[in-house]
């Protein structure tokens, strides 16, 4: 399970202004008629980007290849579609930083191994200003310390304790947990009369 541990995310950042950005905007419903999540990334913020005519943050050259998305308050609110973090992850984002996140969106991110770092309004505003002034700078999110280091220093934030533990020990990855628990699963199954009888 060690390969599933997520201790830090490092890379360039992208700034997305606005509060209460909901999952319907992140991935419009018409793109959810798929069997798998493959290809969802290209449709992230499809309507917003079309309306912005190339001037949306995801389309700006300065933010291409960014791995960390900096947002405002209550990001990911609205419907509970897991396609929203899936689309953003497949666009290339591996962490989100902001003032607050919708609870279901946060849960979906935890299941994908995508950290959410919560900052105060003042710190988040300073970070946004810095990244917009220098989009080429490297930003590092340290999961264990719940900090973010950027050009102008280091910011102390918060990561939900459950998410933080799962990221650090790799237990966010359900498949990896099952693969490493084979012996324990067999032992439990053999101890259950109905399970052992069924196996015979």
Image: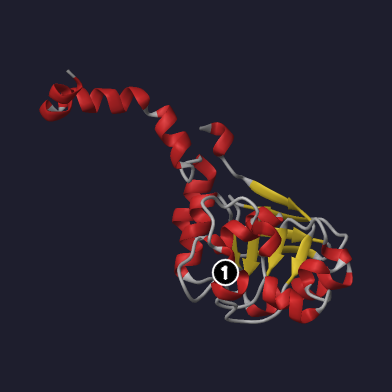
One can see residue 97 in this view: yes
Position of residue 16 in the picture relative to residue 181 (left or right): right
Q: Where is residue 100 in the image (x, y as percent from the top left)?
A: 56, 73
- Residue 158 is at least partly visible in this image: no
* Disc 1 secondary structure class: helix
Colour scheme in the image?
A: secondary structure
- Residue 8 lies, in percent from the top left, at 66, 48
Task: Say which of 30 and 84 sits in front.
Answer: 30
Q: Looking at the image, which is closer to me, 58 or 10? A: 58
Quadrant containing the C terminus in the rendered view: top left
In this rendering, the answer to whether 10 lies above or below 74 is above
Percent across and percent down for residue 192 are 15, 28
- Establish if 10 lies above or below 178: below
- Categorize mark 1 by other alpha carbons within 10 Å: few (<14), some (14-19), many (20+): few
Judging by the rendered image, the residue that carries numbered circle 1 is: 30
What residue is at 57 percent from the left and 60 percent from the top?
A: 85
Q: In which quarter of the view is residue 7 placed?
A: top right
Q: Where is residue 127 in the image (x, y as percent from the top left)?
A: 75, 71
The residue closer to the viewer here, 41 or 121, is: 41
- 161 on left or right of 134: left
Residue occupying the point 85% across, 69% down: 60
Residue at x 50% of width, y 65% of height: 105
Q: Report the residue that reaches farthest toward the top.
A: 200
Q: Is residue 11 left or right of residue 83?
A: right
């Amino acid at each position: 399970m060690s390969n599933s541990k997520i201790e830090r995310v490092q890379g360039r950042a992208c700034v997305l202004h606005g509060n209460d950005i909901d999952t319907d905007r992140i991935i419009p419903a018409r793109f959810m008629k798929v069997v798998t999540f493959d290809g969802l990334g290209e449709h992230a913020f499809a309507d917003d980007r079309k309306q912005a005519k190339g001037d949306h943050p995801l389309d700006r050259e300065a933010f291409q290849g960014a791995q960390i998305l900096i947002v405002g308050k209550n990001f990911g609110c609205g419907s509970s579609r897991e396609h929203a973090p899936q689309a953003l992850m497949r666009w290339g984002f591996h962490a989100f930083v902001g003032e607050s996140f919708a609870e279901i969106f946060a849960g979906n991110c935890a299941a994908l191994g995508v950290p959410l770092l919560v900052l105060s309004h003042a710190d988040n505003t300073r970070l946004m200003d810095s990244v917009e002034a220098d989009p080429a700078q490297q930003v590092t999110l340290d999961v264990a310390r719940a900090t973010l280091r950027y050009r102008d220093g280091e910011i102390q934030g918060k990561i939900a304790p459950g998410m933080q533990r799962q990221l650090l020990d790799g237990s966010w990855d359900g498949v990896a947990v099952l693969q490493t628990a084979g012996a324990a699963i067999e032992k439990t199954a053999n101890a259950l009369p109905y399970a052992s009888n069924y196996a015979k």
